Amino acid sequence: GSERTGTVVATSDASIVHVDLTGRIATIRNGNSFEEGVFLIVQNKEGKKTGVLKALAVREYGLRTADILEGRPRINHVVSAASASESEELAKIYRDPEQE
């Protein structure tokens, strides 16, 4: 058979499955473990940061969505929760309206 091409992402990892740069929304597979409002870091297969997201509310059905705050995340990029120090810095930049 022919050799596989493309990016292979472990199925248990949270990863981007759809990006709407106009609406600044990303859809995430395996992302329901992230709490609403948590900052998320997106990385490509080389481990380079490609974006920062903020998790939206969990929906009863379907995939997880998040606002794109920075960068240009792409399909198959891996998503993980920001560290405590990253979250602290991001919270200074991206405050929710109800916090002001």
Image: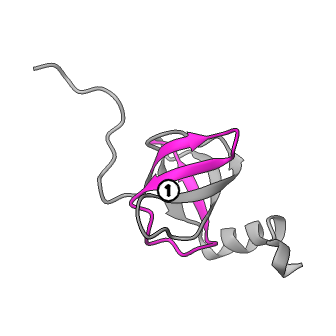
- x, y percentage for residue 23? 69, 44
User: What is the magenta range?
Assistant: 16-45
Q: Secondary structure at mark 1?
A: strand
For this orientation, the residue located farthest to the front is: 61
Residue at (30% x, 26% y) in the render: 5
- x, y percentage for residue 63? 44, 58
Residue at (61% x, 71% y) in the render: 38
Side of 90 where 37 appears, left or right: left
Closer to the camera in the image, 83 or 69: 69
Task: For the C terminus, give its image quadrant.
Answer: bottom right
The amino acid type, in three-letter code, at marker 1 is Val
- x, y percentage for residue 52? 65, 55
Closer to the camera in the image, 42 or 99: 99
Side of 45 where 54 appears, left or right: right
For this orientation, the residue located farthest to the top is: 2
Q: Which residue is mark 1?
A: 79
